[in-house]
Amino acid sequence: MCYSSFNELNAGKHPGALTTLYHYFPHYTTFEGKRKETIRIANFLQGKNWSLMTTFPFSLLESTHWRDYELLDTGDGLKLERFGQYIFARPESQAMWSRALSAAEWNNAHAVFQPTAEESGGHWIEKKKLPEKWEMKYPLPHLQDLTFSVMTTPGRHLGVFPEVASHWDFMADLVRKAGRPVRVLNLFGYTGLASLAAAAAGAQVTHVDASKKSVSWARENQALSGLSEKPIRWIVEDAVKYVQREEKRGVKYDGIILDPPKFGRGPKGEVWEVYKSLPSLFELCRACLSNDPLFVIATLYAVRASAIHVAQALDEIMKKYKGSMDSGELVTRETSAKRLLSQAVYARWSK
Ligand SMILES: C[S@@+](CC[C@H](N)C(=O)[O-])C[C@H]1O[C@@H](n2cnc3c(N)ncnc32)[C@H](O)[C@@H]1O
């Protein structure tokens, strides 16, 4: 229904711009309801200078396949989530509205993260007995489930960023349907779930992260997922340094995933600062792309960056390839009042 309405409006005149319009209405809304307004805006846009307008589609991506994860409620600067059978309350500064669930339901949390003034600082307060770690599953469409362990960590995270799963589906689908050997580079790979999704789909994967602990965790997840036989190279290294070396060695990749933090450090203290470091990392990634790349996916958390900016930067390095760019926000819908929580911006290019 959505696409037929879109095509009708599109009428082959300015496809990019109307794609942008279309995607501004999130995928889960009924497009028909917005039809009149869209036609009005489309008519207005007819007379505009198209060369000045971005043509990247903008989407709100929801990861809808989770069973072991749930965003239960948000509000008052907090989020309440279920990881497996355990419930956690964490700070979420962008939840500027009121909580929908009762205090009793929030008090049901197994642990609450108490932040300190400095960014990412704080500690967990355990309210009920928690195991040191436990297992969760993610059902990758058309492939086996990913099985991985989670636990509370001092950095307030639990070993999985559930909202990013829509990228795993997207990438695994591209790899699965490629019909040729695919080499994937996963930078800032954390506990390895994107690497495992790519490997499960048949890719040969190189996973890079500065933290030895994260890489060990990722290797454990590989075993838990029954993917030990899959070709994954686990590298503890600074992401920029590693890609520099790959470029010198002439190593090429068909797909690259980058999930960098705002600030980070390589194993030898190398400083990662997203605004300063991302442009040169994008350049290095370009040099490491094969002649026939399948995808490049960049996700940014906790930054004041618009998805459009990330898409424009990525577009610069992907110009010579034939493909399409998508950009937007990774969102999760709470089960309580069905509001959306936006957690990251992304841009992704695919063939
Ligand atoms: C937590 S994940 C990504 C999730 C999300 N993007 C975020 O900002 O929290 C970030 C990963 O980047 C890794 N990292 C940080 N600085 C790095 C660097 N210079 N080179 C490689 N990996 C790095 C961390 O060890 C961590 O596993």
Image (tube, rainbow, N blue to C red):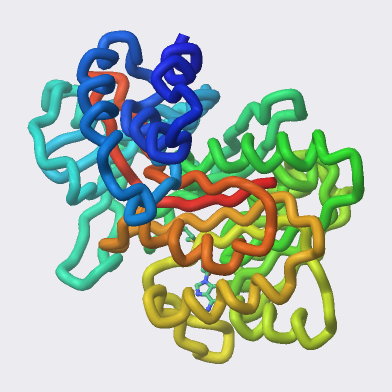
Give the residue at the far front of this rendering.
Answer: 47
Q: Quadrant of residue 147?
A: top right
Rendered position, 187 above or below 197: below
Q: Does residue 61 appear anywhere in the picture?
A: no
Q: Does residue 82 appear anywhere in the picture?
A: yes
Rendered position, 284 above or below 91: below
At 29% from the left and 60% from the top, the residue drawn is 123
Q: Quadrant of residue 47?
A: top left
At 30% from the left and 49% from the top, the residue drawn is 49
Q: Position of residue 11 (x, y in %)?
A: 46, 22
Rendered position, 195 above or below 99: below
264 vs 114, nearest the viewer:
264
Q: How many marks?
A: 0
175 vs 312, nearest the viewer:
312
191 vs 116, nearest the viewer:
191
At 67% from the left and 42% from the top, the residue drawn is 171
Rendered position, 274 above or below 191: below
Position of 9 with respect to 102 (left or right) is: right
Position of 126 with respect to 116 (left or right) is: right
Position of 35 with respect to 289 (left or right) is: left
Q: Position of residue 329 (x, y in %)?
A: 38, 43
At 20% from the left and 30% from the top, the residue drawn is 106
237 vs 111, nearest the viewer:
237
Q: Position of residue 252 (x, y in %)?
A: 81, 69
Q: Position of residue 167 (x, y in %)?
A: 57, 42
